[in-house]
Structures are given as structure tokens and as C-alpha cells.
Image (cartoon, grey):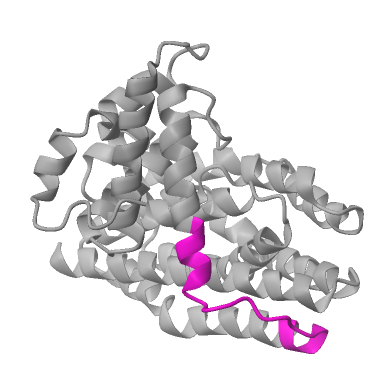
């Protein structure tokens, strides 16, 4: 990568001078019904250089403005391209460059991926879930008890960002799963459509708290946080890797925490007097996701993975939970400012 691309420059000036990084141009390209072979070699070279500059500033130099913009680009690509890698030339260049940098950054924070025994894997995974319940989830009780309902609206906006594409990502993981783990993924996918479809339940909750979500709206409204987009982006990217075990750790961590989140929200929203059907999403997941978490953990345990493969499971869970913790911290700060 090109060294120190943005140092000493105003970030907004850098973005204005980098047409390949413009979100509106990217949206236009993504909405083309078919890829267009219109890029010149010079255009492709310029787009690649700008993407490399942004990736280095975001994930190596830790420039917060650069990281926020990079996450927005990945979020827009994932949302408008149904959580699959894009074929259009500009999105493909941006996606490949930023995705690689993000995944490498997420894994390198762990220094190295260490092999893990069966017992160690189970202990670490359960510990990550417990840590989230202790450090992150108490804010949900506070949000539900605030007199101003804006806190619930902020939570809803950032939760739906993290929840988008769940079934698409499961389908992607199913394609890559070894035979002895496909059943776990398939059963989780099937539960998304049992009873009232989970996508319908999500929309019903948003409507009850006055949130009208769309990817384009999320990029305009400052209450949608790039840290929340990062949760979605990492989960999506882990399911595109040929090695599926990082994603298995990621999904276990998601299922393991969400039934606890759902129980807190069910209790808090009920106390506020919201109609029961408005938060049925959380009532359902209070039970379903506890079962899912057990199934993922049991499936991983019984799959006769190597210690190296279990190490990947642990690394994926750690990366996902670290990213999720940043989402909670950013959400807390936003609610406190509001």
C-alpha cells in the first residue's frame, strides 16, 4: 500500500478529490442492472490507488474519519448488492481493497491465531458471551427506562443496521460449510421462516418506534453509526472466506448474545407499555436464540475439528465481539449526547 496517503491533509478535501470514493457515484454503479465494461485502465488505476489510500488511512493509520467512510462504502456495497461480492468495476475495486484491509486488521489485532483445544474453545466462546452481557447489555435497561423515547429510536436504528443480511450471510456460510456442520447452518436458516417471518418481525418493531430504515437513509442520518455498519460488514466478510471457521465463531457469538439482549428488551419495552406484537421479534428470540447458541456450540464441539480449525472459530468470535463492543460504546456515547 501507498504510505501515509492522507497525513497532513484535511480528510474532506481528500474525499472531494477522490471521485472513486464518492458514495453517490458508488450507489449509481451498484444500481446498474448489469455490469458495464466502461472503465479505462487509467480509471481503474486511479480507483485502486484511492481505495488503497483510504484502506491504509482507515485500518493501518486508524484515522477515524477514514474508517467511518470505509465502513460506509462497504455497508452500501453489501446492502445494495444483497451481501454478495459485486461485479461492477468500481464497487469490485473498492470492495476487494477495503475488505482485505478490514479483515486483516480484525485478525491482526489478535497478534496471531493460536490453535485451541475443544475445552479451551468452549470456555473462550462462552466467556465472550458472558463478557458482553456484563459490559454492554446494561445500557439496554437504561434505554428502556429513559423518559425520552429517542434512546429506543437510536437503539432501533443501530440494531437494524447490525441485523441486516442475516439470512444472506447464513446462506453464504452454508455454501462453504463442511458437511458435518451444514446441518447447524441449515436449521438456523429454517427458523428464520417459521411462524411469522423474522424479517416481518424486525420491520414491525421499527414501525412501532417510528424508524423508517433504508440503506440510503442510513448514510444521511447521523444517528446511524458507522460502528454499527462495521458489525454488519465484518460478519458479511467472514462468510465470504473460503475458510468457514471464522464465520462459525462469529455466528455463535451473535446467537449467544442475542437471546440475552432480547430478554432485556422484552422486559423493558413491556414496562413502557408497548403493544406485545410490536416487540414480538425479541420475545421470539428470547427463547429461539438460546437454542441456536447451544446448537452452534454443540455442532462445533462434535465436528471433530482440528485445533487449528478451532483456533479460527475462536478468532472469528473474538473479532466479531470486539467489533460489536465498539458498536455498543458508540451507541452509548450518542445516547448520552442526545
Q: Is residue 11 above or below residue 124?
A: above
Q: Is residue 237 above or below residue 335?
A: above
Which of the image's four quarters has the C terminus? bottom left
Q: Is residue 133 magenta?
A: no
Q: Is residue 111 magenta?
A: yes
Give the residue drawn at x 12%, y 44%: 12
Q: Position of residue 27 (x, y in %)?
A: 35, 25
Asked if one can make out residue 326 in the rendered structure from this viewpoint, the answer is yes
Q: Position of residue 303 (x, y in %)?
A: 89, 68
Q: Is residue 54 above or below residue 61?
A: above
Q: Position of residue 148 (x, y in %)?
A: 20, 61
Give the residue drawn at x 80%, y 78%: 307
Say which of 163 and 197 sits in front.
163
Asked if one can make out residue 154 in the rendered structure from this viewpoint, the answer is no
Q: Position of residue 192 (x, y in %)?
A: 69, 45
Give the residue drawn at x 22%, y 65%: 335
Start-end of magenta stretch: 103-121
165 to the left or right of 144: right
* Number of marks in picture: 0
On the image, which quarter does residue 312 sit in? Answer: bottom right
On the image, which quarter does residue 143 sit in? Answer: bottom left
219 to the left or right of 124: left
Give the residue drawn at x 35%, y 45%: 52
Amino acid at each position: 500500500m501507498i504510505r501515509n496517503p492522507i497525513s497532513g491533509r484535511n480528510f474532506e478535501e481528500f474525499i472531494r478529490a477522490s471521485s472513486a470514493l464518492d458514495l453517490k457515484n458508488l450507489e449509481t454503479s451498484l444500481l446498474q442492472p448489469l455490469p458495464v465494461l466502461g472503465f479505462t485502465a487509467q480509471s481503474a488505476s486511479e480507483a485502486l490507488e484511492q481505495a488503497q489510500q483510504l484502506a491504509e488511512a482507515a485500518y493501518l493509520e486508524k484515522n477515524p474519519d477514514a474508517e467511518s467512510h470505509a465502513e460506509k462504502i462497504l455497508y452500501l456495497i453489501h446492502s445494495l448488492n444483497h451481501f454478495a461480492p459485486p461485479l461492477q468495476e468500481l464497487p469490485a475495486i473498492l470492495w476487494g481493497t477495503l475488505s482485505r484491509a478490514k479483515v486483516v486488521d480484525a485478525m491482526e489485532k489478535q497478534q496471531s491465531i493460536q490453535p485451541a483445544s475443544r475445552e479451551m474453545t468452549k470456555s473462550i466462546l462462552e466467556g465472550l458471551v458472558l463478557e458482553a452481557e456484563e459490559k454492554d447489555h446494561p445500557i439496554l435497561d437504561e434505554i428502556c427506562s429513559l423518559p425520552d423515547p429517542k434512546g429506543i429510536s437510536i437503539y432501533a436504528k443501530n440494531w437494524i443496521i447490525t441485523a441486516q443480511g442475516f439470512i444472506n450471510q447464513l446462506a453464504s456460510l452454508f455454501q462453504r460449510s463442511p458437511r458435518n456442520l451444514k446441518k447447524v447452518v441449515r436449521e438456523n436458516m429454517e427458523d428464520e421462516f417459521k411462524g411469522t417471518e423474522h424479517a416481518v418481525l424486525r420491520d414491525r418493531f421499527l414501525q412501532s418506534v417510528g424508524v423508517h430504515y433504508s440503506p440510503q437513509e442510513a448514510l444521511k442520518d447521523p444517528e446511524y453509526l458507522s460502528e454499527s455498519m462495521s458489525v454488519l460488514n465484518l460478519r458479511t466478510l467472514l462468510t465470504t472466506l473460503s475458510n468457514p471457521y471464522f464465520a462459525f465463531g462469529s455466528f455463535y457469538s451473535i446467537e449467544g448474545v442475542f437471546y440475552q439482549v432480547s430478554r432485556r428488551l422484552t422486559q423493558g419495552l413491556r414496562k413502557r407499555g408497548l403493544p406485545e406484537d410490536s416487540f414480538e421479534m425479541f420475545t421470539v428470540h428470547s427463547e429461539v436464540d438460546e437454542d441456536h447458541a447451544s446448537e452452534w456450540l454443540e455442532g462445533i464441539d462434535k465436528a471433530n475439528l482440528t485445533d487449528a480449525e478451532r483456533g479460527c472459530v475462536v478468532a472469528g468470535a473474538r473479532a466479531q465481539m470486539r467489533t460489536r463492543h465498539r458498536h455498543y460504546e458508540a451507541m452509548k456515547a450518542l445516547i448520552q449526547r442526545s
